Amino acid sequence: MPSCLIGGAPTRRGFVVAGFALLAIPALVGATFSIVACDRDGNCGAAVATNNLAVGASVPYAKARVGALVSQFETNPHYGPAGLALLAAGQAPDAALKSLLDGDGDFDGTTIAERQVGIVDTKGRAAVYTGTDAAKATWAGAERGDGYAVQGNGLVGKAVLAAIKDTFLSSSGTLGERLMAALEAGQNAGGQASGKLSAALIVRTTEGDWQDIDLRVDAAAEPLRDLRQLLERHYALQAIIRAEHQAKKGAAADARASLSEALRRSYGWDRIWRRAARLAMTMGDGDRAMDCLGVFLSINPAWAKTELRDDLYRPLRERSLFQTWSR
């Protein structure tokens, strides 16, 4: 029989010793930190990181013009839809939280002692809850303020939540950028005592559609690093779309600025470099189109070879470098 005991095959006495040792080990701790927030425009979102698998599948919820919610430690996935419905019906976060806890029903064999919840609405009101068992997970705590709530368990200390809160309050940019920066600050302050595995960021915007953010890293050695790259690519797409619209309106300077932002935030996304090349051609900038095509070719040679055959690039076909690429 395989054994993790030192010294080969386990003995009966070895099993007894191991049994007592297991009794002395505390239950596995949770390890999650998160922030929920809404801005004055009605955009709402949540950012969360944990050492468990696929945190974005069940922990964070948000709805524009309504609010945002996380349920963690021992997650009750019914809290998200139910909590948002209560907020949408006009309940304040404190009242909505009480309703959720009262109706918990010991989901999945756990109780409200194992829940940790943060809720915020678009009026700036927030509510937090940490159950008695969740509070025992290494370091655990929560804090709420105007338009936000931060909460965590299994953390290295209170500095993690302080960093999340302070960074969110002092940062600028879109709600998504502020939430991401806050989550990264929590990790940089030590994060979870038991490691890291997944992270997620959702933002429901008043515009909806492609402006919304719903990004997940379900399992990775550096989930926040990977989540940051996904978010940058989201904003790269927004920037290239904006650049295309500006170019059509004749706002060339604005289009060039937006194009530069798209490339800066692309993290090697081939589609952005392809669209950038095409946009440069429509703006009569062959040199920039060549630069973008060169990067596109290095990222995705097969697709780039097909792209080079498009008649859009006819003005470039006399260039020796272009001819080299086309062979």
Image: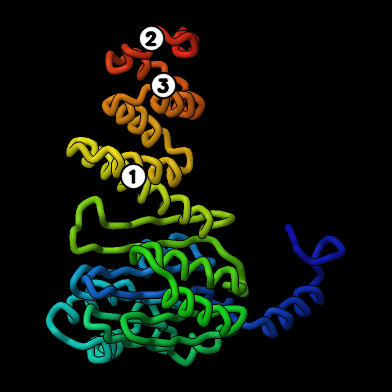
* Distance from Cα at disc 3 to Cα at disc 1: 23 Å
Given residues 168 and 80, the one toward you in this image is 168
Residue at x 46%, y 27% (from the top left corner): 291
* Distance from Cα at disc 2 to Cα at disc 1: 27 Å
As helix, strand or loop, the secondary structure at mark 3 comes to: helix
Residue, disc 1 = 258
As helix, strand or loop, the secondary structure at mark 2 comes to: loop
Disc 3 to disc 1: CB gap under 8 Å: no
* Distance from Cα at disc 2 to Cα at disc 3: 15 Å
Disc 2 to disc 3: CB gap under 8 Å: no
Closer to the chain start, of discs 2 and 3, is 3
Q: Is residue 274 left or right of residue 299?
A: left
Pair 2/3: label in front: 2
| Label 1: few (<14), some (14–19) or many (≥20) C-alpha neighbours in 10 Å | many
Residue, disc 3 = 304
Q: Three-letter amino acid code at disc 2?
A: Arg
Residue, disc 2 = 317
As helix, strand or loop, the secondary structure at mark 1 comes to: helix
Residue 324 percent across, percent down from the top left: 49, 10
Q: Three-letter amino acid code at disc 3?
A: Ala
